[in-house]
């Protein structure tokens, strides 16, 4: 008797939207978006970012959803199913490798945020002298053991959720954690925008100063739109493959893009009004979250409360993203090697954690060891985020726009044959998205 095991699926529309939004909303939104906005002059950069989301992010996200949904397979086998005998499936392999690399250092950064949450609760974070925050952060990330212990804790949480499967793990936890994240973030935003002196920060986010934009700002905005929407490595292909044929994909992609952008903006409104109110530096770079913000919380009445919920919400955001990254190789291994979900999740989770440990140590005792002039952590980030993701996004756009028949692509996305949205979408995929992605890519590898 032939028995094929039924593939796990999302149980509800809202469950899928929350899971995909949970993937998109992560450290990218709360840690990186505010600091690159700060470095690139505020609101004018935000406008460029919004255009990048609309012209490149949304079309590629819809493409990933439809590839997965149509094929009902993991990131690699989806291409093999839709284009048998053609080399497009290499895109899927790149995605699996990128997922592996990204999660290994993502887990390390998430571990830092758990450390900060714990230090905020216990009071030690806010009891130090404000001038010590930069050293405190450097000391944490360069310690041999401490960041690794927190990284392991984070990875165990990630593994535990993925072990539960699509409906009982990923979907269930996204439905709990995403609303919680929003509530916590709104509490911090409400506090921040009502501080005396908050208006300078609000103006920074709303009043465009185009003179602050440079050519690099455009590239940074585009690259970040990609990372923030979780595109280019098959995350959204994998999640799309757990969707039923009934789902309206363009609407889902619109919802997820809007949710991701809204949370990034809210993170800006949580951070900048307070940063300006206390006269801190907005362009503090990657240290904004870990060095500048603790000094802000220190001056805030009930600072311990606000610091705790802020860092806790960063951990939550990171967790719902990490599960989506782990799911990419887990889906591939279970399908390819017919492993059980438990075996694939434990195996991949452990190997990724081990690679992450090396990344963590490369900021400390192993910092002397470099590859191509970069320590291991930075090299992982560079190869995955700046090479594999843009290439992945490039081929995904080309696959749908040129590799599939127009009629087939329209049908798989759920557009009527003559839909003008559909035509615009294909047009961006054919020309705008690939050209912009290639420009960013050539710039990151130093050719232009
Ligand atoms: N988008 C997440 C963030 O903003 C990170 C992430 C999850 C990701 N899955 C991804 C990035 C896939 C690139 C590709 O933090």
Image (spheres, rainbow, N blue to C red):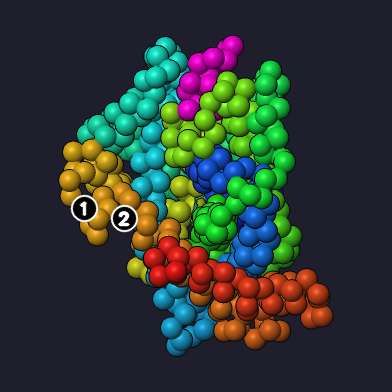
Above or below, 157 against 407 in this view is: above
* Location of mark 2 (residue): 379
Q: Contact (CB < 8 A) between labels 2 and 1?
A: yes
From the top left corner, tell me how far across and down residue 270 is, in percent. Answer: 62, 31
Above or below, 188 against 385 in this view is: above
| Label 2: which secondary element | helix
Q: Quadrant of residue 309?
A: top right
- Tell whether circle 2 marks a residue whose Cβ is less than 8 angstroms from ligand 1: no
Q: CA gap, disc 2 to disc 1? A: 9 Å
Residue at x 37% of width, y 57% of height: 382
Q: Say few, some or many: other residues with alpha carbon within 10 Å of mark 1 (under 14 / 14 to 19 / 20 or more).
A: some
From the top left corner, tell me how far across and down residue 131 is, in percent. Answer: 39, 19
Q: Is residue 332 on the magenta stretch?
A: no
Q: Is residue 310 on the magenta stretch?
A: yes
Residue at x 53% of width, y 26% of height: 280
Residue 155 in sight in this render: no
Q: Residues in magenta?
A: 292-311
Q: Nearer the viewer, residue 234 or 247?
A: 234
């Amino acid at each position: 008797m032939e028995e094929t095991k039924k593939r796990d699926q999302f149980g509800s529309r809202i469950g899928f939207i929350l899971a995909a939004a949970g993937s998109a909303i992560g450290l990218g939104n709360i840690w990186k978006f505010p600091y690159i906005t700060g470095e690139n002059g505020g609101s004018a950069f935000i406008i460029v970012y919004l255009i990048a989301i609309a012209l490149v992010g949304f079309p590629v996200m819809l493409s990933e959803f439809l590839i997965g949904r149509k094929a009902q397979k993991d990131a690699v086998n989806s291409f093999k199913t839709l284009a048998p005998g053609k080399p497009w499936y290499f895109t899927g392999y790149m995605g699996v490798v990128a997922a592996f690399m990204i999660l290994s250092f993502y887990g390390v950064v998430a571990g830092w945020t758990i450390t900060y949450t714990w230090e905020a609760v216990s009071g030690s974070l806010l009891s130090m002298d404000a001038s010590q925050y930069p050293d405190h952060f450097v000391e944490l990330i360069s310690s041999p053991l401490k960041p690794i212990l927190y990284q392991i804790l984070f990875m165990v949480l990630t593994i535990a959720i993925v072990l539960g499967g699509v409906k009982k793990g990923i979907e269930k936890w996204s439905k709990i954690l995403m609303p919680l994240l929003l509530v916590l973030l709104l509490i911090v935003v409400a506090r921040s925008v009502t501080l005396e002196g908050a208006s300078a920060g609000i103006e920074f986010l709303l009043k465009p100063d185009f003179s602050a934009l440079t050519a690099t700002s455009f590239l940074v905005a585009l690259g970040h739109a990609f990372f923030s929407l979780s595109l280019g490595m098959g995350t959204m292909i994998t999640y799309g493959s757990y969707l039923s044929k009934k789902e309206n994909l363009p609407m889902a992609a619109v919802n997820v893009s809007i949710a991701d952008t809204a949370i990034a903006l809210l993170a800006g409104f949580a951070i900048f009004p307070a940063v300006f109110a206390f006269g801190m530096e907005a362009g503090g770079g990657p240290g904004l979250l870990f060095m500048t913000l603790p000094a802000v919380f220190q001056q805030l009445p009930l600072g311990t409360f606000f610091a705790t919920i802020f860092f806790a919400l960063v951990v939550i955001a990171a967790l719902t993203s990490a599960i989506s990254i782990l799911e990419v190789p887990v889906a591939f291994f279970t399908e390819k090697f017919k492993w059980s979900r438990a075996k694939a999740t434990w195996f991949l989770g452990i190997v990724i954690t081990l690679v992450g440990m090396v990344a963590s140590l490369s900021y400390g005792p192993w910092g002397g060891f470099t590859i191509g002039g970069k320590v291991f952590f930075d090299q992982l980030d560079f190869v995955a985020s700046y090479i594999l993701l843009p290439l992945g996004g490039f081929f995904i756009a080309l696959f749908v726009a040129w590799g599939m028949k127009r009629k087939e692509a329209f049908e798989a996305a759920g557009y009527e044959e003559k839909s003008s949205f559909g035509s615009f979408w294909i047009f961006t995929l054919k020309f705008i998205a690939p050209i912009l992605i290639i420009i960013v890519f050539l710039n990151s590898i130093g050719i232009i």
